[in-house]
Amino acid sequence: MAVLVTGGAGYIGSHMVLALTDAGESVVVLDNLTTGFAWAVAPQAKLVKGDIGDEALVEKLVKEHGIDAIVHFAGSIVVPDSVSDPLGYYLNNTVKSRALMAAAVKSGVKNFIFSSTAAVYGNPESMPVFETARPAPISPYGTSKLMTELMLRDSHVAYGLNYIALRYFNVAGADPKGRTGQSTPRATHLIKVACQTALGQRKSMDVFGTDYPTPDGTCLRDYIHVSDLIAAHMDALRHLRKGGESGIFNCGYGKGYSVLEVIKAVEKAHGGPVNHVLGPRRAGDPAGIVAGAERVREVLGWQPKYNDLDLIVNSALAWEKHLMKRNAA
């Protein structure tokens, strides 16, 4: 058996590849390297440069490597970009995911784990938000992911494609062993941007919106350490291989932090200021979203180890320092 990881040269995907290879799994990575890095892929894995929308290529990889599970990370993730280029997001996140599923069904792959998002909830009516809440995305990004979830649901019924869709909240931090992290130079993840600003890689950072109905007026988010998120993927893989039921699970800690609280945490870790500019709201951003994440614990047996904002920030800051040295070499 082998696992195909799409987008395995990217931030979250590279962590998944490490977890799989650490566990002794055979891993094939399919990545077009548009935003990913070949050096981020664990050397034990086989890296194939290609597109997830290439059904013939996916079928070939399944046949050659005996793939029994696909873990699908590849896609576009910047909410404001999805607002300005919705058709690009529907192509990359929805149409190509459909092609990937079609190849999986045709090739007899039975297990599919999908990288979804809390953005499918939009502005939830109450918090924490649970999997039973009505999806109401407010950005093309969120809609593109919801459409893929629906395709998985229908493919499960029609073709027996077993799946787990994990709805991520805000992923941050880096591998505790320092092997990989968020490496995209222009990434929009708040904690990465704040760390880059603290280290002088950016002159300042923007705070989008100060008039939200939150304690300090800035957006509230549930931040989850990337290694805990990957542990949920490993639990999902075991669950499906044992014949567990398909379904959707939130991945978060159930506690929210505001943008200004995150900036203060980075200032604490760095020991210096993070220059920031208060500005207007950004299109597609919900005011606050916090996970109701009991189900992933109860059904998949997930046990997070890094549920601490300071720990997340420290690992992210350490990775940024590592990248600075790497890029300077």
Image: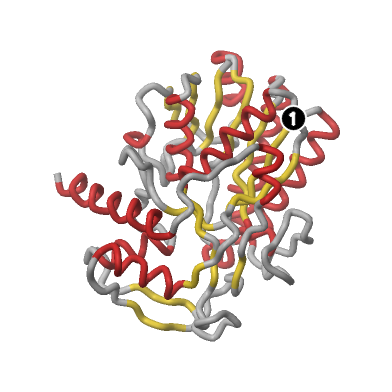
Q: Is residue 142 visible?
A: no
Looking at the image, residue 174 sits to the left or right of residue 283; the answer is: left
- Does 227 sit above or below residue 218? above
| Residue 140 x %, y % | 64, 61
Mark 1 closeness class: few <14, some 14–19, many ≥20 residues within 10 Å? some
258 or 159: nearer the eye?
Answer: 258
Residue type beneath disc 1: Gly
Q: Residue at x 38, y 42 (%)?
A: 175
Q: Residue at x 22, y 66 (%)?
A: 200
Looking at the image, residue 207 sits to the left or right of residue 219; the answer is: left
Q: Residue at x 33, y 55 (%)?
A: 314
191 or 255: nearer the eye?
Answer: 255
Looking at the image, residue 118 sits to the left or right of residue 215; the answer is: right
Q: Is residue 7 visible?
A: yes
Q: Quadrant of the N terminus?
A: top right
Location of residue 245 by image quarter: top right
| Residue 94 x %, y % | 66, 47
Q: Quadrant of the C terminus?
A: top left
Location of residue 163 by image quarter: top right
50 or 5: nearer the eye?
Answer: 5
269 or 138: nearer the eye?
Answer: 269
- Does 219 sit above or below residue 183? below
Which residue, given by chain and number where applicable, does mark 1 sit on?
244
